[in-house]
Amino acid sequence: MLNNNKESDDPKRDVFISYSHKDIKWVKECLLPMIESWQLDFAIDHADFLPGKRLASTIHEFITTSKHVIFICTQSFIDSEWCRDELETVRAQDPASIKQKAIPVVLNETSVPDLLADTIWCNLCGRMYETDEWKKLCKALNGNWSPTSDRILAGQHDLSLFFGNMRDNDTETIILARSHSTSEIKGVSNVLSDDAAIGLSHIYTFLAEAGKTKGLRLVLSDRGGNLSDHFAQNAPMNLIIFGGTFQGNKILDRISNGLIRYKQSSEEPKYCYEIKGNLFVPNQDHMSFIIYKSRTEADNTVLVLFSPWPYANRLAAQYFGENYWTFVNHERDREFLNIYEVENKDSVPVLIRSER
């Protein structure tokens, strides 16, 4: 039986990670790559806890035999009884913080447990990719900062340059999507086509991969311009326009300062674009779609994934989702417009027009 109040005199590893499972995406995608780049021996529940053992005693064993314990401080951490128990165990083993056993990594300043209030934080609130804070954490854990550490932070910094506050979970991002009105289903006023639903799944996937898992609001707009929910269309906002909507076209024209306008008529050419005041007519026998992103600004980044063809509209979301790192690496915070052509459903999108 382990004595939970006594720390091992010969720790088996450098660090154990204590976190709420609601924060596992950040832990896996942001924290673990950095710790690995510091050449530290670490343990985390999903990789190191073996089936068949009692959970409570396993947690205590890993805490006791680790030199440091990182606590990922969020509201989810505070709400977790398991996390609170882990913190109490560490405080009992090092009550005066002489051995620096408890290392708080704070993602939300209002979510620091009382038992860590007098302990110096690694403060990543609002500065998730600030080198100085990560280097201090590396030093506290006796890690070795490496060129890989720099590359990881550089990549995350480029993501922030590209998406701006759109990937910040504390700010709202609106997804404005085309839908169809219906009166056939009681209590349902908007429905999505299969292509629109699949396209939205691609959008939610790449946002999650970029770190945006909270603060998303889906607003649907039908053919008549009726919205499922209202938002201040002339106010600064983080916005993804998916598909052709009355409101989206107006916002795109305003945000791009007339760089691009979509035009549709009953005559030939049926689908075309006005780019910088000049008419651009894609091949009418093929499908086309556009990817546009405004210049990155705080609370005012607009991404447009649009095609007049439902399938190509879905393809715009899929293509961006599969290639967003390419856009991040080449565009960063710049405004850009790309128009792609698709010959048929089996063909690869071809870039036919690009504007910066």
Image: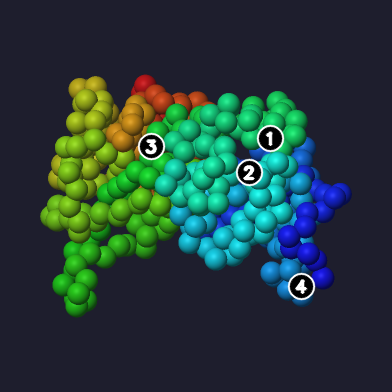
User: Residue beneath label 3, please?
Assistant: 165
Where residue 128 appears, as percent x and y from the top left, is 51, 36
**Residue flagged by tag 3: what amino acid is it?**
Asn
Residue 270, x across and y down, in percent? 21, 41
Residue at x-position 16% and y-position 37%:
234
Residue situated furthest front in the rendering:
96
> Label 4's element?
loop
Q: Position of residue 76 (x, y in %)?
A: 48, 57
Neighbour tally class for label 1: few under 14, some 14-19, many 20 plus, Cα within 10 Å: some
Label 4 Cα crowd, 10 Å radius (few <14 / some 14-19 / many 20+): few
Q: Earlier in the sequence, mark 2 or mark 3?
A: 2
Q: Are marks 3 and 4 in contact (CB under 8 Å)?
A: no
Badge 4 is on which residue?
53
Task: Determine the image quadrant of residue 93.
Answer: bottom right
In the image, 90 versus 105, the foreground residue is 90
Q: Which residue is mark 1?
A: 140
Q: Which mark is residue 103?
A: 2
